[in-house]
Amino acid sequence: MSGTTNNASGRWSQNLRQGVKSLLKSRIAETLAYPHGVDRYLEYINPAWSLNEIRASVVSKCSQTSDTVTLKLRPNSNWQGFKPGQYLRFSVSIDGSLRTRCFSPVQSAHADDGLIEITAKLPADAFVTRHMRDRLDIGDVVTLSQAEGEFALPDTRPQRIVLISGGSGITPVMSMLRTLCDEGHQGAITFLHYNNRYSDQLYADELDALSHMHPNLKVLRCYAQDTHGELNGLFSEAQLAAAIPDFDTAETFLCGPPGLMQAVETVYAARACTHRLHVERFTLAATPVTSENPAGDVRFARSERLAANSGQTLLEQAESAGLRPEHGCRMGVCYACTCRKTSGRVRDLRTGQLSEDGEQDIQICVSVPEGSVTLDI
């Protein structure tokens, strides 16, 4: 009887929330809230409330290593979930400016606490992640996007899976591993992780526990600068083949720094099994096309600013000019920085391809100007 009562109460609460949300989205509510909009008034009641945006409050924060920060976030009801391996855009207001970065949720797709977990590494220029570690407090509210990206576990789980990661690239594949373990996946799973030192290892205790709990899971860690791992040295075909002799018949999911990514891709290309390799990049493997003597000017039309072309990406040049255009991953993946080029030609750092002159939507984080360029910024 109590179960039936709880179910009925849950349905009643859900119907009530949906009814209130429909009312707040009505034209009457929009008219009454004009010119600020309904969300502005909802913020006064609870900063995490929004009709359309995904807002999330920070419920915990810790540092697993000296240069990382792990957050757990409670999103509002606009969050629609994710597939293990996907990423989201994380936006936070810093000194009055909205800054955005991309992070992969680390939790299992079957986690029942409703929280989103992200872990970020702090490189030397990590403005946003330093803010996350040093200034973001429990109870603070951030804005998220829905989950994005094609890097994800397929709905039909492969029977044999290889997970390869390096450094903070562990986050999307850790979500995959947690999900597979929660599902009781019976197929063979091999997890290879690369780091400089044992002290840099994320989720070390959990990996140990999972490998003891699941006999079909083999965890192999490799450290370049110490001998605490199951493997030693840098990635190589010989190392991979010794650990997984038939790796070319398994579905492999890879995320890590450019050197590791390139090495793994080279091995899979040589074995003619790149169709089994699925990758996610956290950094841009740039094509060196920046001119040594850049010419022309960059005009930011809406801001009425003009800057001499420095040869950097258009995002970097906009920031140097004191502008704060929206952006996320800074490597051409999330498309958050896309804006309109109204004149001039740009070159894509990833491919070296030169654009046409005239109007075109471009990703300014991976585009460098070839001569004078005008942007609608």
Image (cartoon, helix red, strand yellow):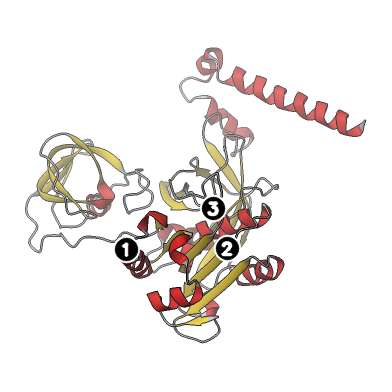
Residue 242 screen position, x and y as percent: 47, 77
Could you tell me the amino acid type at mark 2?
A: Ile
Name the residue beneath numbered marker 1.
Answer: 269
Single out the residue that lies furthest toward the top: 28
Single out the residue that lies furthest toward the right: 1
Residue 63 screen position, x and y as percent: 58, 67
Q: Which quarter shows the C terminus?
A: top left
Tell me if 86 is positioned left or right of 323 in this view: right
Q: Quadrant of residue 303?
A: top left
Q: Quadrant of residue 29?
A: top right
Q: Relative to residue 340, is residue 312 depicted above or below? A: below
Which residue does the image show at 49% across and 78% down from the upper left?
222
Which badge, 3 or 1, comes first in the chain's sequence? 3
Question: Quick one: label 2, few (<14), some, or many (20+) residues within 10 Å?
Answer: many
> Considering depth in this image, is 179 or 89 the residue closer to the camera?
179
Q: Which quarter shows the N terminus?
A: top right
Could you tell me the amino acid type at mark 1?
A: Ala
> Considering depth in this image, is 181 or 28 the residue closer to the camera?
181
Question: Quick one: label 1, few (<14), some, or many (20+) residues within 10 Å?
Answer: few
Residue 219 screen position, x and y as percent: 58, 71
Q: Relative to residue 40, is residue 200 depicted above or below? A: below
Tell me if 323 is positioned left or right of 247 in this view: left
Which badge, 2 or 3, comes first in the chain's sequence? 3
Residue 158, numbered label: 3
Residue 130 screen position, x and y as percent: 47, 62
Tell me if 348 is positioned left or right of 98 in this view: left
Which badge, 2 or 1, comes first in the chain's sequence? 2
Name the residue beneath numbered marker 2.
Answer: 189
Tell me if 6 is positioned left or right of 68 in this view: right
Which residue does the image show at 68% across and 25% down from the upper left?
17
Secondary structure of residue under mark 1: helix
